[in-house]
Image (cartoon, rainbow, N blue to C red):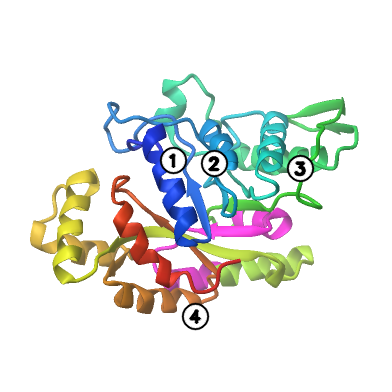
Amino acid sequence: MIEGQEGLTWDRWFRIADRVESLGLDSLWRSDHFFSLMGHPERPALECWSSLTALAQRTQRIRFGPLVSPMTFRHPALLARMAAAVDGLSNGRLSLGVGAGWNEAEHEAFGISLPPLKERFDRLEEGIAVIKALWTGRPVDIDGHYYQLRRAAALPRPVQRPAPPLLIGGDGERRLLRIVAKDADEWNSHAPGPEAYRGKRARLEEHCRDVGRDPDAIHRSWMGGIVIGRDATEVAEKGSWIQSFLSALSGVAPTAALDELRRRHWLVGTPDQVGSQLDAWSAVGVERVMLQWYNLDDLDGLALLAPLNRDPR
């Protein structure tokens, strides 16, 4: 999972895509943001959907998608058409990840309205209904509170039938997980640790019972950070690099950086050690992990992930 606003360029994107595909990894994901969220406006921030369009033709096997596209950034009718086009270009390998939107500074900088939280969830739910209706290929009439469509049809339809998987990212227990229960094909969590995730999953299952949906119909994934090296020395070296890159670790003693990342529930260690940590996530029901890969030039490190790809879908 690439944080595309933190230094991603076309050269880096293509090198990463080629390596992920050749290693046999399951999928490649990227954020949908407009500039660095770490206080580095000088870092390149490759536009998300342009990069996914290129990825559709650059690769042949891997699945891919945004993690996630805020509904605040684009009208859902436009997002539905964009996703259908990219799904067609990739011969049916896109998963559409959506969320409610959250970063206030980013919205303000680009003149995009960021409504109060309740309205953002209302727009997310209504926007999902627009997307799903347009993906049927039939003329759509919707008289929503935020979105109105009159005999709107989006052709060609996506390649995948009945539609591309819809992934919803977030952990809000009251409203977000209810939308997941009603609408998502995949739920992506950023829960701080397996035990916290277990509680979120239990809440999701409650919502599924309320809306009459089988919880097992929803695939479960988790996104989190990783520091992986061939041995303890390389793990320490990569930990130092991460500390220099992430402003959130600037006040941590260098000798304590890896312990701090572990405390934040990053996966840290050699492949065997990371594999054991992944077992804990598997035990609470996570089926796929999206690993945040911050060092965009560490292509050799990606090879250490290949043995961990034990059950690709």
Marks 1 and 4, Cα distance to the nearest angstrom?
Answer: 34 Å
**Height in image: 151 above or below 59?**
above
What residue sits right under mark 4 in the picture?
Answer: 283
From where the camera sits, is residue 3 visible?
no
Among the two numbered marks 4 and 3 on one chain, the one whose residue lies closer to the N terminus: 3
C-beta proximity under 8 Å, tags 1 and 4: no
Q: Nearer the viewer, residue 133 or 269?
A: 269
Position above or below: 75 against 285: above
Horizontal placement of 61 versus 241: left or right? Answer: right
Of the numbered discs 1 and 4, the one sitting upstream in the chain is 1
- Range covered by the magenta-colored residues: 176-200
- The answer to which of 237 and 213 lies nearer the viewer is 237
Q: Mark 1 or 4, which is nearer the eye?
A: 1
Query: Residue at left 50%, top 51%?
Result: 28
**Residue at (71, 40) in percent of width and height:** 88
Percent coordinates x, y for residue 311 in the rendering: 54, 73
Residue type at numbered disc 4 = Ala
Q: Amino acid at mark 3?
A: Pro
According to the picture, the residue beneath numbered tag 3 turns out to be 158
Type of amino acid under label 2: Arg
Q: Please tell me in which quadrant of the rendered image residue 233 appears.
A: bottom left
Residues at circles 2 and 1 in contact by the CB criterion of under 8 Å: yes
Q: Earlier in the sequence, mark 2 or mark 1?
A: 1
Which residue does the image show at 41% across and 21% down from the upper left? 109
